[in-house]
Amino acid sequence: MAESVVGILIKQLSTLLSQEITLLGGLKSDVQFIKDELESMKAFLREAEAKEDNDSQLQAWLKQVREVAYDTEDVLDDFTFRFAREAQLVGIDKPKAELISKILDDHSQLKVVSVAGMGGLGKTTLVKKMEPLSDKESWTLFCNRTFQSNDCGVLALKDKENTDEWEMILHGFGGEADGSGKLDRIKRVLLLSYNDLPHYLKSCLLYISIYPEDYPIDVVDILPKWIALGFVLDLHGAELDNIPKHVFKLFHLKYLSLNGTGVKIIPKSIGKLQNLEVIDLRGTNVTELPVEILKLRKLRSLWLGGWEDETLDLQHSVSPKLGFLTLLRFNGRLERVPQWVTSLQSLRTLRLLNSRLREDENVISSLGHLPNLVSLTLYRAYEGETLCFEVGGFQKLQCLELGQLKRLKWVRVEEESMPSLRIMRLGDCKLMQELPSGIQNLTRLESLGFYEMSNELMHKVRNLDYQTISHIPQVFVGHWIDGQWEGTFL
């Protein structure tokens, strides 16, 4: 782990060295020396950590290196920030010219120039007498001080004239804003764990702070946000009809959630967010996507659809340009499985809800050739009577969920189909009266669940056909009673 931290420092120093010489001043040679020393140290660390030596002295030294590396990283961050801050001083041009003029005007006598101004205006960096800033300069200064950027993110959407909104933001900072340090004790306790975390987990821990105390954190909810750490915009539940134009200026944005908003149209400008990895459009009125979505070459997860009676228009071809997609979730009627979906080589998770696909669409056959599909859910997604998992299909599928397929009567599993399947769940498919034929071919199946299935099928599961599934370690039969699942393991 110490090697990885040192590696990060080397990258930071390399970036620093690539900056203008004026930024580093006379320190460039010193920075180069530190970088060279760290590279030598990294080579030794790689060998030391690979040996997994239990020598106590070596382990103590490795720990010290790691701590020094973290301290060095903090110093580098501070160094970079200070120089960047000098470059971002606002309202400085005119006072700078006046100050130089006053100093150079008269060489006949010594001169004292008074310097005054509130904290943070840059008095130390540039000795000057401040004049009141314009509204535009004041806003830019606020953004620089708060976000180290000319861009204030979502705060830019706030009404600058509405003092009540800004009072609420101020109170939200609690004791940290008034300097009373009420959170210092919590900070000290958390740091005991935080300091020993590897760098790639520190951000994950910090992200949890967005949740209220005792709030249950859903893994499915937080994972995509961890993926996009530091570049997240979650507008879940906001009263929006359109996406604010300011959003499309967030070039580095990786996670965008419009879940539960009133947004109807995704504009062409979505193509500007070329670093976007996750788009959550669940619970919106969006039923189609603009062709500009093809520009999102880093897109990993796409969640679309909010109402079961809506028809999603997704037939236009977008593959292979969205070849990085690993998760798709569609909620709404589909005329057919879009051709581009069947050619997504990286797709691992597919959820089709309320799709109402017809039997003649040959759904399973079209999806069975996805080479990396691990999880498949069909919920109210199919209106045929038979599902056939053909020979050689779904080679990596591990989890299969079939729910509320109201017309489904038979499921057939052919040999060498789904050889990696570990979990199968069947729910509320009331016309099924037989076990899936060929289920004995699923030799790796670990868990089989029946939820609200027909009485005829449940009788056979418990009695006549039990030997057919006796090789499965966990078989569950459940019913929805008084708002919760109740059942037994066979």
Image (cartoon, rainbow, N blue to C red):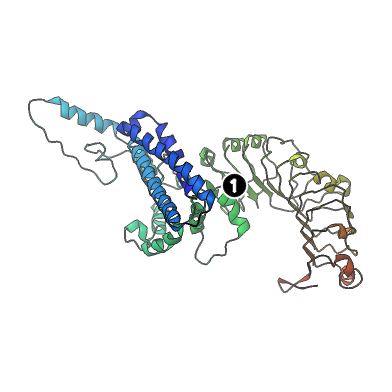
Judge whether residue 142 can be spotted in this image: no
Residue 18 lies, in percent from the top left, at 42, 31
Q: Residue furthest left?
A: 109
Horizontal arrangement in the rendering, residue 415 relative to residue 333 (left or right): right
Q: Quadrant of residue 294?
A: top right
Quarter holding the C terminus is bottom right
Horizontal arrangement in the rendering, residue 152 relative to residue 180 (left or right): right
Is the residue 164 above or below the residue 347 in the image?
A: below
Secondary structure beneath label 1: loop
Mark 1 surroundings: few (<14), some (14-19) or many (≥20) residues within 10 A: few
Is the residue 225 above or below the residue 474 in the image?
A: above
Residue 473 lies, in percent from the top left, at 78, 67
Q: Residue at x 35, y 56 (%)?
A: 177
Q: Residue at x 83, y 67 (%)?
A: 453
Residue closest to the eye, 282 or 469 = 469
Residue closest to the eye, 490 or 303 = 490
Q: Residue at x 57, y 46 (%)?
A: 255
Is the residue 424 above or below the residue 129 in the image?
A: below
Figure disc tally: 1
Judge whether residue 449 can be spotted in this image: yes
Horizontal arrangement in the rendering, residue 208 relative to residue 120 (left or right): right
Horizontal arrangement in the rendering, residue 310 relative to residue 125 (left or right): right
Tell me the residue that label 1 is attached to.
241
Residue 39 lies, in percent from the top left, at 44, 39
